[in-house]
């Protein structure tokens, strides 16, 4: 198992990758569950992901509250993370972001977002759309308490991604590497589908069998997954921070 | 209250942010009202926003004229700013720009620009479209005197943004931070709406209640607003110029 | 009048600007007529515009042939320039490029490219589309001799820009600054029109009166024109090469 | 003939160019056939193309197996290359990538990808679309053995490019320079066609005569081809690695 120190360093890398790959900007966040205490998770204090360093990471409980005295401001929407960890014991990493190219699928009601490219398979057959207004009426469109977070988590269900109407998305996975990978390819899948729609005609979606076959072959430190993580980390200026918790070799 | 020196430094930062975030290019400008004399405002001499430094800032009156002898050239369209400050006493900052992705909404007549993403809420329920030709016929499409500026300001009314047909937009807010934030998210909202239109079906606009709820929660130096200002300033190479006029701490 | 040395330096700047602003890439070129000999013009040897330096500039006659012995390779399509200078005595600068966003207007036959934004006004009311196949049948789609160049120049007529089907565009203006400005805003105008088409409804084109008014106010070293040239040159890393042939001051 | 050392250096350049020009990212690869042994080819070990150096290049046989003991991981999809070299003796270089803007043409079934711009001519009149599901049913959508590779190669036939449904493309050419050039212009041609479709009306495709004329004039070290290779290599930070196997001069 990764040491806490390594895990937190990976969380910093994850933040920087998501910023560099235009998944997050000033807003959006990524978290990872505490490996030794499933009722806690790590996430940054309120700060733009590109600027995050190790000392910005805080430890929260599953109510979204800090486990130690904390004077620094926290993300308003940390309840998204808490509620998903609460509901999904097998999930160890969560992203919430507003990546621009997925937004239209939470605005236009005609076309569901589904995988159309192999790298988009991890979003799964079904990407539910959660609209905060359905249950909570007129809000500031942010998830600012556990009740809202739980309602989103309920909509997410056993899926990997939920779109949030007029807002963004939440994604959940077994590992940090996986949730980052899925969150980077989600907007790409959205762009490919949007343009395919413009070209017209029938759409060739991934089948359930294809999605299952890809999922079956996934491993967080496989050569193929690591290749992307290494590449993205280096692009984000974090090459020197790369470690392999599985003991594999890092080529620097 | 911010010292004048700090305010002018923030105006430099605002110019650089708008350039870095592709809201302005060689053209476009941002101004701020004089905190002690509501009949004056600060704006750069005629210069591309990315290149502006403190010594480029000039002080103009509400007729758009310099209050001190000024040999350097001024922006032809400074009357946009003067006229909006004249009409809207509560407005303290104005942007005029030609951000590419809002232009189609001033060219195509079928689809109004309205908020469809939470970060676009600040543009408000109604974004009027002003066409200089309606009153002034064939011009060079620029706002080059007070009469034209006042006509635009009248069209803007109590709204936050007016589109300018075949030209760009003008936005107005209570503070510099707010007008920059709105001007950065305006093109993003436009892109999201354009693509949602391509996907087809009913559009999920923000409701008036949602817009009001977001507006009610807004504060220029809140953690969330500052997070974006800090991030954008650092991206624009202005991290060293950051100050908080409210006395809050700046993490450098 | 600008010294030859200054003019050639401006031609280097023009090349670098067009590369930085994505008007040209490995291909595309810009030329300027010899100020003392209207039957000659300057253009680079065959080289990607971003890489061009003063020693790469060659002097050609109006048949597209070098006026001095030249062992280096020349652009295959230099006849575009020669033919336009031959036909249009008032033209002193020409660009030929393949800027991506204008290409659809030379491929789809349903929608003419016309000015829809104020900065696009200089392309004029009419942008003819030249198809090399109309007269020359199956070619390599390049303009490789004077006969083809003259046919293109004839299609261009008294307009400022001609689209070249399945290929790119040629633009012509009184000065280098003007032809660069027009060539930078041409793709932007194309993008705005493309997206307006997607939004649907009636298109608000610039009127002839607006285009004329803008053209009447144009001057190659006006504050407004210089502002863009200065900005683009600095972005392209050429700030140190800026000079003003009209004797105006350069702020460095 | 190029020395092996020079050829491998060119393969490194090709990888870096494809990364810089957004044809590949963490995934995708380019290979070159061994000049002295047509049953072998060179390709990188499993690594993101932007990070590849000479020592990462391995030598494989036409079954996709390493000819020397190799402990490092290999690309899962190396069989694409092996199968194309096996079937096409005149082909000496292959690219497989997921360039985003070609993906819609492998997803939407209404519109074939054909050349609409002169620089896209090298993709040829016919770009077949291969769907792995047609013969292999539900897979992970990757080409992971020779049988799948041969089926793709069969679909490619004598064409230059095959699209791979829900996945990407494979391109094949006589030389490295040619396959890189084609792979860079393929997405551009796709974008131009996509946007032309949005503008509406009849599409002006390149004719067979035009494609043949362009192909007839092609030479891997012609001034025009070299101009792009030199430019792309310098953009990718590989200017110092440029050599001309034909003995021509490199301007550095």
Image: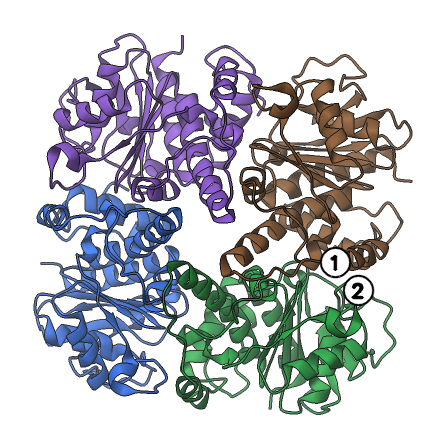
Chain colours: A purple, B blue, C green, D brown
At which x and y percent is residue D140? 56, 20
Foreground residue, D47 or B121? Answer: B121
Secondary structure at badge 2 equals: loop
Q: Quadrant of the C terminus of chain B?
A: top left
How many marks the image carries: the answer is: 2
**Quadrant position of residue A102:** top left
**Quadrant position of residue D225:** bottom right
At which x and y percent is residue B216? 8, 48
- The answer to whether residue D232 is left or right of residue A156 is right
Q: Are marks 1 and 2 in contact (CB under 8 Å)?
A: yes
Circle 1 crowding by C-alpha within 10 Å: few under 14, some 14–19, many from 20? some
Residue in view at x 86 percent, y 45 percent? D245
Residue A70, compared with residue D10, is above or below; it is: above
Residue A219, compared with residue C180, is above or below; it is: above
At which x and y percent is residue D62? 81, 22
- Residue C57 visible (yes or no): no
Identify the mark at residue D207; answer none if there is no mark.
1
**Labels 1 and 2 share a subunit:** no
- The answer to whether residue A25 is left or right of residue B116 is right
Identify the mark at residue C138; answer none if there is no mark.
2
- The answer to whether residue C40 is left or right of residue D39 is left
Chain for disc number 1? D
In space, the residues marked 1 and 2 are separated at their CA atoms by 7 Å
- The answer to whether residue B172 is left or right of residue C88 is left
Foreground residue, C187 or D236? Answer: C187
């Amino acid at each position: 198992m990764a040491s806490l120190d390594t895990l937190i360093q990976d969380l910093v890398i994850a933040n920087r990758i998501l910023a560099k790959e235009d998944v997050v900007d000033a807003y959006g966040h990524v978290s990872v569950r505490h490996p030794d205490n499933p009722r806690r998770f790590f996430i940054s204090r309120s700060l733009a992901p590109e600027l995050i360093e190790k000392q910005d990471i805080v430890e929260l409980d599953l109510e979204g509250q800090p486990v130690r005295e904390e004077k620094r401001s926290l993300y308003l929407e940390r309840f998204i993370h808490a509620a998903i960890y609460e509901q999904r014991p097998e999930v160890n990493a969560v992203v919430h972001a507003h990546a621009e190219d997925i937004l239209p699928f939470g605005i236009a009601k005609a076309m569901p977002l589904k995988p159309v490219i192999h790298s988009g398979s991890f979003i799964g057959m079904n990407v539910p759309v959660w609209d905060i207004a359905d249950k909570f009426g007129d809000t500031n469109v942010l998830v600012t308490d556990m009740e809202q977070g739980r309602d989103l988590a309920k909509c997410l269900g056993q899926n990997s991604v939920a779109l949030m109407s007029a807002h963004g998305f939440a994604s959940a996975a077994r590992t940090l590497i996986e949730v980052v990978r899925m969150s980077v390819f989600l907007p790409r899948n959205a762009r490919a589908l949007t343009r395919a729609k413009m070209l017209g005609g029938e759409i060739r979606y991934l089948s359930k069998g294809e999605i299952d076959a890809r999922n079956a072959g996934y491993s967080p430190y496989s050569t193929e997954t690591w290749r992307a993580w290494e590449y993205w980390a280096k692009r984000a200026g974090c090459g020197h921070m790369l470690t392999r918790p599985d003991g594999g070799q890092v080529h620097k």
